[in-house]
Amino acid sequence: MPDLTPDEFRRQGGAVLDWVARYRERLPALPVRPEVEPGSVRAGFGPLPEQPRPVEELLAELDRLVVPAGTNWQHPGFFGYFPANASLPSLLGDLLCGGLGAQGMLWSTSPACTEIEQALTDRLAAALGLDPGLTHGGGGGGVLQDTASSAALVVLLAALHRTSGGAWREDGVDGTERVYVTAETHSSLAKAVRVAGLGGRALRTVDTVPGTLAMSPSALAAALDADAAVGLRPVLVCATVGTTGTGAVDPVPEIAPLAAAHGAWLHVDAAWAGVAALCPEHRHLLDGVERADSFCTNAHKWLLTAFDASLLWVRDAVALPAALSITPEYLRDPASESGRVVDYRDWQVPLGRRFRALKLWAVLHAFGLEGLRSHIRDHVALAAELAARIEAAPGLALAAPPSLALVCLRADTGDPDADDEATRGLVDRVNSSGAALVTHTTVGGRHVLRVAIGSVATTRADVEALAALLGV
Ligand code: PLP
C-alpha cells in the first residue's frame, strides 16, 4: 500500500493544521471539562475501516467524538494540576520530528539527533544558570527523557549501581537500599523505588520543617545516620524544587552535603518550577543544584513545549551508561566503540528514541529566551495579584505561601470543621462553571484548592474570571 503522495500529504496536512487552528480558536467557548458518562466515548467508536477513508471523515469524527469528551488542557481557563503547555510552535516541532522519522538510539543511527540534543541541553543549562559540570563539555550532560518519572527511575538505577560499587548490575538489590523523600515528594519517586525492585520498605519519608512543607535537613541527617548505623545503604536523596501540592522548595544547599557525606546520589526534581530559572530573579531557586548529581525540569509543563519533553542533567556522563548499557551484536558500532560519541540509548530505559530536541528547538526558535521569560513572568505576576486578593478576602485564606504561579487557598469560615466542606464546594463551583478548572490537594490534613496559572492561552481576563468565580 503506497504512502500519501507529497501533494496529497500537503493537502491533508493543510486540513489537519486547519482543524487544530480552529480547535484552538474555539477553545474559549468550550467547557474546560465536559460532563461525560464512563464508557460513552468507547460506545460511540465505530468499526475499523476496511478501506481507506478521507481525512475529512477522521476530522469530523474528532468533532463528534473527541472534542465533546475531552478535557481541554489548552483552554485559557485551565488552572488544574500543573500546566501542560502545548504551544503551536512546539506542535510544528513535533511534526518536523515525525517528518524526519529518525531513531536516535545510537549516535550513528542519527548523529544530528544526538548532537542537537547535546548542544541544546548544554545551551539550556547555561540559560538556566546550571553548573557547567552538568554539561556535555563539563563531564556530565543533558538528555531529554519522556517524563520526570522516567528521569527519576534512571537516576535511581544509576545511584543503585554507583552505591553498590558496581555490583547492582549483576547482583541486583539486597534489601539494604534506602531512598529519602518527604511526604510532599512527587509519587513518581515512590513508583521508581518499586519499579526498581526495592519495595516500599526502601522509601524513607523524612519530616518537613515544622510550619513549612520543605524537607528538614536535621531530620534527613538523623535518618541517614540511623540507617547507616544499622548497615542500611543510603542510595538516593530526592530534593524537590517546587512540590506538586504547594510549590514548596526543599533546602538543597543544606541537603547536598548530607547526601554527599553518606555517598548517596542527590537528585533534584524541579519538574514544574525549574524552568523559572530562565529568569534571573528566580535563579536562586536552584541554589545548591551545583552540588547535585542530577537535576530534572520538564519543558512539557510550563515551557511552552507539548508533552513529552523532560530535561535531565547528570553530573557524571558515565553513570547512566555504566548502569544501563547492554550491547548485543546488532548494536555494536565503531563510533560507539571509539568512545568519542554519546549513545543516548544508554541514558534511558527504551532502546528507540525520537528527535525530541527538534520540538524544543522549535519552541526556543519561535519564542526566544526572552519570550519564554515573559511567559513565566506574566504568570508569576498574575498569581501574585490573585494571592493578594485572596489574602484580603473574608472567608478565604492562603493555605501555603504562593509559589511562582501556584496559589493554594482554602475556605476560612471561622469553624475549622466546616472549612473542608466549604473548600470542596468552592472547587465544585469553579469546575461546574465550565469556564475554569482547578484541582485540589491537602495541606496539614486540610482540603485545599490549587490554582496553577500557566496555560499557553491564559490572560489577565481569564484570571479575573476565575477570581470572580472564587468571589474575590
Ligand atoms: N515531579 C514533580 C514535582 C511534579 O509536579 C510532577 C508532575 O506534576 C512530576 C514529577 C511527574 O512528571 P511527569 O509527568 O513528567 O512524570
Image (spheres, rainbow, N blue to C red):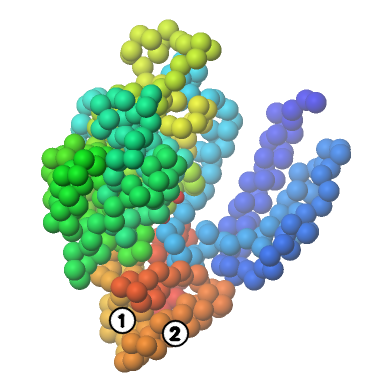
Looking at the rendered structure, the secondary structure element under dot 1 is strand
The residue wearing badge 2 is 421
Amino acid type of the residue that numbered disc 1 sits on in the rendered structure: Ala
| Left or right of residue 471, residue 293 in this image | left
Residue 414 position (above or below residue 323): below
Residue 18 position (above or below residue 331): below
Residue sitting farthest toward the bottom = 414
Q: Is residue 130 visible?
A: no
| Left or right of residue 65, residue 113 in this image | left
| Left or right of residue 227, residue 88 in this image | right
- Closer to the camera in the image, 161 or 401: 161
Which quadrant would the C terminus be assigned to in this image? bottom left
Q: Is residue 175 visible?
A: yes
Residue beneath the point at 24% across and 40% down: 233
Q: Earlier in the sequence, mark 2 or mark 1?
A: 1
Residue 343 position (above or below residue 85): above
Amino acid type of the residue that numbered disc 2 sits on in the rendered structure: Glu
Location of residue 405 in the rendering, given as x and y in whole percent from the top left corner: 33, 63
Location of residue 116 in the rendering, given as x and y in whole percent from the top left corner: 40, 27
Q: Contact (CB < 8 A) between labels 2 and 1?
A: no
The residue wearing badge 1 is 397
Establish whether ligand 1 lies closer than 8 Å to the Cβ of label 1: no
- Closer to the camera in the image, 82 or 3: 82
Location of residue 171 in the rendering, given as x and y in whole percent from the top left corner: 37, 27
